[in-house]
């Protein structure tokens, strides 16, 4: 191990001070790390599966109603599966303050201090006791897949038309749409 021969108390104190300064300098991060101020919004998932179930049912009813009136489709059953839940995005004011202070002492050492402060508040409407958060936007659930069972589902033409309609209506890729021949 290392052996230091420090004879006087003054030499020991200077050595300890130098080691302490080195540790202090190394403990501060280097560079100026400033983050830009970015407006932000918060999201909140809608009230569980019950609202998703209603949304799925409404979509299924509407698709069923349209497909029944298409030539060659016949009786039809529709199943739509959602990938996510409905989200409500609320307006949030966010501020970020960052400062970097660099100090030099009389013995030639430097000290850097980086201060970072963030605060965010949800924007509320009105000025009375009935304040409510400002709704930025509502995001409808994304569709994971669609299965359609139709009497005319055995015909390649009908399958193709139904699949193309679902692609156009819901922006769902063809591999997530399955059209089957209905058996009564």
Image: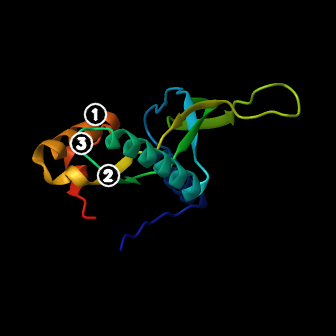
Is residue 159 among the parts visible in the rendering? yes
Number of the front mark, 1 or 3: 3
x then y, percent, for residue 46: 59, 48
Q: According to the image, label 2 marks what residue?
A: 75
- Say the numbered circle drawn on residue 162: 3
* Residue at the outermost right position: 129
The image quadrant where one finds the C terminus is bottom left
Q: According to the image, label 1 marks what residue?
A: 168
User: How did the renderer colour the structure?
Assistant: rainbow
What residue do we see at 35% from left, 74% from top? Answer: 1
- Say the numbered circle drawn on residue 104: none
Circle 2 — which element? loop
What residue do we see at 68% from left, 35% from top? Answer: 122
Is residue 22 among the parts visible in the rendering? no
Do the residues bearing badges 2 and 3 touch, measured as CB atoms within 8 Å?
Answer: no
Circle 1 — which element? helix
Q: Residues within 10 Å of mark 1 (few under 14, many from 20)?
A: few
**Gap between marks 1 and 3, in whole Å?**
10 Å
């Amino acid at each position: 191990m290392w052996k230091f021969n420090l004879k006087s108390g003054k030499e020991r104190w200077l050595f300890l001070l130098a080691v302490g300064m080195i540790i202090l300098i190394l403990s501060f991060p280097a560079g100026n790390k400033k983050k830009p101020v970015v407006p932000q919004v918060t999201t909140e998932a809608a009230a569980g599966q019950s609202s998703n179930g209603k949304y799925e049912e409404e979509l299924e009813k509407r698709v069923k109603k349209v497909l029944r009136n298409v030539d060659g489709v016949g009786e039809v059953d529709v199943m739509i599966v959602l990938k996510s839940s409905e989200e409500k995005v609320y307006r949030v004011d966010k501020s970020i303050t960052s400062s970097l202070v660099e100090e030099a002492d009389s013995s030639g050492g430097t000290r850097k201090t980086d201060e970072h402060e963030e605060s965010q508040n949800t924007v509320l409407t009105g000025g009375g006791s009935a304040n409510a958060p400002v709704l930025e936007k509502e995001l409808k659930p994304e569709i994971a897949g669609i299965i359609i069972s139709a009497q005319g589902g055995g015909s390649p033409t009908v399958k193709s038309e139904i699949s193309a309609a679902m692609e156009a209506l819901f922006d769902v890729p063809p591999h997530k749409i399955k059209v089957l021949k209905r058996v009564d």
